[in-house]
Every structure is written in C-alpha cells, then in structure tokens.
Amino acid sequence: TTISKVKDPETGDEKWEPKGNSSEAPIVVAARKIGFSENVSDEYKRVLEIPFSSSRKMMMTVSDISGRAELCQGGMPLEKGASLLAVVKGAPNFILDYCTEQLAEDGSTKPLSESDKASVLEIVDKYSSKALRVLAIATREFPQMPFNMKNEDLSTDQKFEACRSNLKLLGLVASIDPDRDGVPGSVVAARGAGIRVVMITGDYLK
C-alpha cells in the first residue's frame, strides 16, 4: 500500500491518495506522519511475512533492523542488540491477548495490565460504534529469529506462534471506508423496491 500526491480533478487542489489495501492506508499515512520515508520498504528488509487469516485475525511481518538505535528519526527506541523487528496488525481483542507491554507517550516501555487492556477495548468499542474500522499495532524485537529459518518442516502457524508472544502494544488505528461507487444509489433503489438492506461487516465481537 502506498500514498501519492495527486491533483483533485474537481478543485485542482493537491491531495494525498492511497493505493492498495484500504485497511493499510491509514497505517501508511500514520507512518509518514511520524517520520518514515516513502522508501521504508527498501530501508527495512523484510525477512518474513505471515499473511492475515480468519483464525489468527492478524498479519505479521519481520524486518531487519540491524544497527539501528531507533525505529525512525525521533521514533521508538530499539533494544540494544536487536536485529529483527516483528510487527503485527489486526483485530485488537486478539492482539491484546499476546501483549505484555505497551509503548508510552515518552517512548518508554511499561507493563500492560489487564486493566490497561480493558481500557483499550473500551476505546475500540467507542470507535467501532461510530462505524470505524479499528486495528491494533504491536511489535516485538529479537536478537535473532526465534526458530530455525532453514527448517522447511515448520508450518506458517508454528512460525507465527514462535514470534507472537510478549508483544508490545504501540497503539490503535481507526479509519472509515468511503462509499464505493454506485452503492448509495443501489441502496436507495433496493429500498424503493421494498427490499430491506442489511449490512454485515467485520469480525470484532463486543
């Protein structure tokens, strides 16, 4: 997913337009705001990617952070000796189950208690009730991969389980999906024909 500056055909004004996965677009925007460059994928070599699944409710990437003291200029401090960074994004209630720490506003790390998790879920409920899609972002640093990369017998789930424990919660990202072209008119037409329209979305259980 990328964002690029384009010119609005109606107003002529320049604006940022995301391209790719709509759930990743707000994360890319947030990353650019905190200091990541548009070439972040080239600067942080990805060594592992575990895709989203309906059972895991999240996806994970592991990237090389060798020689870095902070995630980006002025960003989260990295542990001394860490060479790999796992990042997960997905359903908050699932990710919180694996989190034991949280990133504080001053960049320090502090424990994530059950009370803290409950408070986070209250925020998720608040945003979800406003029809916003809410994702949690968490990380974990490693001095080396917690499994043998050469072992071809390891399944995707086994690799995921080896990396998912003791995560650090970075925060939440909330976004709303814009109306798709033609949808408002189709809903109006369906209602006019006496058809009851029901929208079922998401997998977050309150």
Image (cartoon, helix red, strand yellow):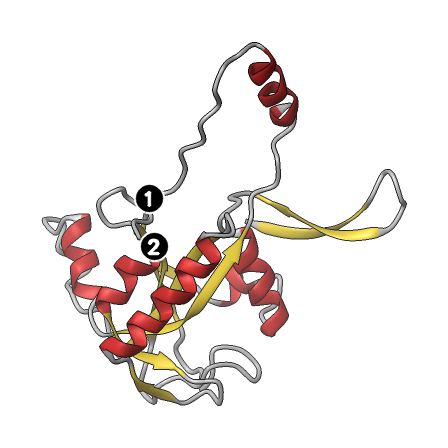
Report the disc number at residue 24. Answer: none
Question: Which residue is at a point 47% across and 78% down the rendered structure image?
Answer: 71
Residue 140 at least partly seen: no
Question: Which residue is at a point 51% across and 44% down the rendered structure image?
Answer: 21
Q: Count all numbered tags in the image, as a single digit.
A: 2
Question: Which residue is at a point 59% across and 51% down the rendered structure image?
Answer: 2
Q: Where does the image place residue 131, in percent across and percent down from the top left? A: 50, 47
Mark 2 residue element: loop
Q: In this rendered view, identify the residue nearer to me: 116 or 150.
A: 116
User: Do callouts 2 and 1 mark residues in contact (Cβ within 8 Å)?
Assistant: yes
Report the disc number at residue 203. Answer: 1
- On screen, residue 104 above or below 181: below
Outermost residue on the front side: it is: 194
Q: In this rendered view, identify the residue nearer to me: 120 or 87.
A: 120
Quarter of the image where one finds residue 123:
bottom left
Query: Between marks 2 and 1, how big is the CA–CA gap?
Result: 8 Å
Amino acid found under the numbered disc labelled 2: Ala
Q: In this rendered view, identify the residue nearer to me: 125 or 183.
A: 125
Left or right for 172, reference 109: right
Left or right for 128, reference 74: left
Q: Which residue is mark 2?
A: 91
Outermost residue on the top side: it is: 193
Quarter of the image where one finds residue 159:
bottom left
- On screen, residue 32 above or below 51: below
Q: Where does the image place residue 128, in percent across and percent down from the top left? A: 44, 53
> Upstream in the sequence, badge 2 or badge 1?
2
Amino acid found under the numbered disc labelled 1: Asp
Q: Where does the image place residue 193, in percent across and percent down from the top left? A: 57, 9
Residue 139 at least partly seen: yes
Mark 1 residue element: loop
